[in-house]
Image (cartoon, rainbow, N blue to C red):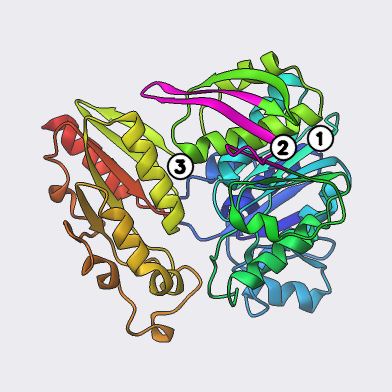
Amino acid sequence: MYHFVGIKGSGMSALAQIMKRLGYEVQGSDVEKHFFTESGLVELGIPVLPFSEDNIKEGMKVVRGASFNDDHIEIKKAKELGVPVFNYEELLGSLTRKFKSITIAGCHGKTTTTSMMAHVFNEIKGANYLIGDGTGYSNKENETFILEACEYKRHFLNYTPQYAIITNIDLDHVDYYKDIDDVIDAYNSYANNAEKMVIACGNDPYTHYLDVKKPIFFYGIDEDNDIIAKNIDYKKDGTSFEVFVEDNYYGFFDLPIYGKHMLLDALAVIAVCYYERFDAKAVSKALKTFKGAKRRFTETKVKDNIIIDDYAHHPNEVKATIKAVKQKYPDKKLITIFQPHTFSRTKEFAEQFANIMNLADYSYVMDIHPARESQEDYPDVTSKLIIDKLEHGEAITIDDVDKLKDYKNSVLLFMSPNDISKLENETIEKMQEG
């Protein structure tokens, strides 16, 4: 029996589903608040219990999420009983060595790229996958395992992939990484774990600092890349382009994707498909039916308004998402609703966040979600660091639906890795009533 401590975490939920489908007994524990990651657990009949030391029994194997330390009541009990305790990334790492694994890392875009890769492989040959939006699937008969690889605290160094994908390298998780050189060092170690090849975004400046032992191929829109998108047309109904690999024409793609960041995500997928010798027309057909990852540019139409839910929480993600909205909805007013994530990230990037949100017509900023951090450690860091730099914007709370319900012919872009669905859902309800 595998017991998952913090089973509602997006990665933990996905991994629990994978282990269940591989034939293991699985249960888990977490807080009683509802999370969107629960649906897959419910479908598979995986028990989710409130935290209690009584959940831990002899003969179990305990898997803990990144937020749970040795002082947690269940971890304490496991150690008292001599029950083995694995970190999430350790168990996941063991799975990468049992399958032909493709790991997707990057400070931005890894969830969408992983989801897209899993979709295409499933359409063409079948694959197991773990996606950071809480989605996990496995079948013992599949030879391929596709997974999102997180760089936080160098967790991705536990993995042994055939293909190591890098969508970009950027300074983030500033509570852990000292500077960009520290981040590059981590990615370099990750890349050197690849058994077959590394596929990295060549449009990202920092990927060119990597010093890897295995072959490395770069994808992008510049001529010095190995996998290149040419004749790109960004349209209101999507993006079309041709792909050349090492100067050889591979295929034409006309896809329902928006923004350069989505084009690059698709190129990462296409690159792997090329080296796996998939037919370009089959890849294009599969990509056309990709519906997106959960909470990544998820759209709801309400009268003449568009509500978009997105996970963006780093300045470069926010910028890419805003640009994608402007490509798809150039004639609508853009309103952003943003919840900063962690005090350390807000302190580091407040000015960048404000400059980017000034691209919108109006911006609302919520209180900072602390995640793993404490306000006591950052007494002077609040959302005002961003708000005071906005040209058109103000504070908003989870209950301030009246500030949003009267917009017309607008895109309301909700951005946060935390759950702010209460404000979003009530805004949709009020707009429908109005």
First along the sequence among labels 2 and 3: 2
* Residue at mark 2 to residue at mark 1: CA–CA distance: 24 Å
Q: Position of residue 93 (x, y in %)?
A: 80, 55
What residue is disc 3 on? 295
41 within the magenta span: no
Q: Is residue 314 above or below residue 254?
A: below
Quarter occupied by residue 79:
bottom right
344 vs 286, left or right, is: left
Cβ–Cβ below 8 Å for labels 2 and 3?
Answer: no
First along the sequence among labels 1 and 3: 1
241 within the magenta span: yes
Q: Position of residue 113 (x, y in %)?
A: 61, 39
First along the sequence among labels 2 and 1: 1
* Residue at mark 2 to residue at mark 3: CA–CA distance: 31 Å
The residue shown at (76%, 59%) is 190
Quarter occupied by residue 91:
bottom right
363 vs 328, left or right, is: left
By secondary structure, the bulk of the magenta-drawn segment is best described as strand
Q: Characterize the local packing of mark 3: few (<14), some (14-19) or many (20 or more) Cα atoms within 10 angstroms.
A: many
Region rendered in magenta: 218-243
Residue 144: assigned label = 1
Q: Position of residue 221 (x, y in %)?
A: 57, 37
Task: Look at the numbered disc 2 and give the secondary structure of its residue.
Answer: loop
Task: Look at the numbered disc 1 and give the secondary structure of its residue.
Answer: strand
Label 2 amino acid? Asp
Label 3 amino acid? Arg
Which quadrant of the figure contains the C terminus? top left
The residue lying toward the viewer, choosing from 96 and 213, is 213
Task: Look at the numbered disc 3 and give the secondary structure of its residue.
Answer: loop
Residue 226: assigned label = 2
The residue shown at (28%, 51%) is 337
Q: Is residue 310 above or below residue 230?
A: below
